[in-house]
Amino acid sequence: MLSPADPLATFAAVFAALYVAHQVADHWVQTQHQADCKGRPGWPGRLACAAHVTTYTLTAGLALLAVMAATGLRLDVGPVAVGLAVSSVSHYIADRRTPLRKLAELLGSARFYALGTPRPGRDDNPSLGTGAYALDQSFHLFFLFAAALIIA
């Protein structure tokens, strides 16, 4: 049983739960429609992204509940709500694509962001191995870290 008096153990358990939930929600729970449409302009893109972030947040909540049930860890509802909100909002921002691309450009990483994308008129790299994906995942992990700190 984890003691709420042990902040390091609480942080580690919360971060592990959020990280696993992130991987499952981003790669297994997310529908193909959400993955294809969440970065599109306008309301169709916004709605697809919101649907993805909703299932993403529910997956994170379930992971936290599982850790609590398995370890006896007690978490305060307020910090959990704030932490999940930070994770959810940051996830939505990154998955809308344009904000993350603009951030990469601002930080001088535009070439890395574009790494691995198909050349114009070709479909020569249909893979997950792109700079955009790597920056997307590291952006998410940064905010999972922040969320875990808030919750712990």
Image (spheres, rainbow, N blue to C red):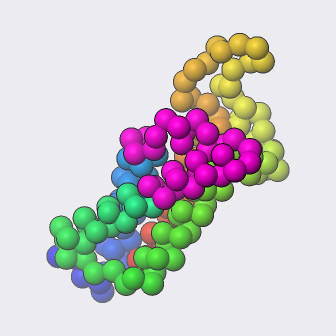
Q: Is residue 83 magenta?
A: no
Q: Nearer the viewer, residue 57 or 17?
A: 57
- Tell me: residue 37, above or below residue 151: above
- Tell me: residue 74, above or below residue 125: below
Q: In which quadrant will I find the N terminus?
A: bottom left
What residue is drawn where x is 51% and y is 77%? Answer: 82
- Tell me: residue 3, above or below residue 130: below
Pinpoint residue 55: horizontal percent, then vertical percent: 44, 55
What residue is drawn where x is 58% and y is 20%? Answer: 126
Number of numbered markers: 0
What residue is drawn where x is 65% and y is 15%? Answer: 123
Decide if residue 100 is in sight here.
Answer: no
In the shown orientation, is residue 32 left or right of residue 17?
right
Decide if residue 130 is in sight here.
Answer: yes
Q: Which residues are magenta?
A: 27-56
In which quadrant of the rendered view does residue 2 lie? bottom left
Pinpoint residue 67: horizontal percent, then vertical percent: 26, 66
In the shown orientation, is residue 80 left or right of residue 43?
left
Q: Nearer the viewer, residue 144 or 49?
A: 49
What residue is drawn where x is 49% and y is 35%? Answer: 32
- Tell me: residue 151, above or below residue 21: below
The dominant secondary structure in magenta is helix
